[in-house]
């Protein structure tokens, strides 16, 4: 299963997009496709690693959703914390 399929079946696209937008804003805003992919790709790579580490055969869709949702929530908290520290 691809990362795109996992995001689709878990219904976490909007949630993931919120995280991406936070990172884009933190890096100075949208500055073109290259800058976008330099911001997004590392996030997707980290999410993929998290899924590979935590997911097991036979997991339900809800269990998978919780893994993805928890990871995104943690990343959003960390992104918000680092933004507040800079102020």
Image (spheres, rainbow, N blue to C red):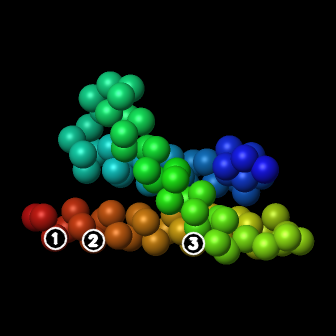
- For the residues bearing labels 1 and 2, Cβ distance under 8 angstroms: yes
Q: Judge from the rendering whether residue 86 lies leftward or rightward of residue 6; answer left or right.
A: left
- For the residues bearing labels 1 and 3, Cβ distance under 8 angstroms: no
* Secondary structure under the numbered disc 2 in the rendered image: helix
Name the residue rendered at 85%, 70% in the picture: 57
Q: Judge from the rendering whether residue 53 lies leftward or rightward of residue 82; answer left or right.
A: right
Q: Judge from the rendering whether residue 13 lies leftward or rightward of residue 60; answer left or right.
A: left
* Secondary structure under the numbered disc 3 in the rendered image: helix
**Residue tagged by mark 1?**
85
* Secondary structure under the numbered disc 1 in the rendered image: helix
Q: Earlier in the sequence, mark 1 or mark 3?
A: 3
Q: Can you tell which mark lies on residue 81?
A: 2
Q: Earlier in the sequence, mark 2 or mark 3?
A: 3
Q: Can you tell which mark lies on residue 32?
A: none
Residue 86, picture quadrant: bottom left
Visible in this render: residue 18? no
The quadrant the C terminus occupies is: bottom left
Decide: few, some or many residues near mark 2? Use Cα within 10 Å; few <14, some 14-19, many ≥20: few
Mark 2 → mark 3, Cα distance in angstroms: 16 Å
Q: Is residue 31 above or below residue 38?
A: above
Name the residue rendered at 32%, 33% in the picture: 35
Name the residue rendered at 44%, 44% in the picture: 40
Residue 8 in the image: state x and y as whole percent.
72, 47
Residue 80 in the image: state x and y as whole percent.
30, 65
**Residue tagged by mark 3?**
70
What is the number of callouts on the image?
Answer: 3
Name the residue rendered at 24%, 45% in the picture: 27
């Amino acid at each position: 299963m691809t990362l795109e399929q996992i995001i689709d079946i878990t219904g976490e696209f909007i949630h993931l997009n919120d995280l991406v937008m936070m990172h884009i804003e933190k890096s100075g805003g949208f500055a073109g496709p290259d800058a976008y992919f330099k911001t997004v790709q590392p996030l997707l790579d980290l999410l993929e690693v998290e899924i590979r580490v935590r997911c097991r055969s036979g997991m339900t869709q809800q269990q998978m959703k919780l893994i993805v949702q928890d990871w995104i929530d943690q990343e959003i908290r960390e992104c918000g914390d680092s933004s507040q520290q800079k102020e």
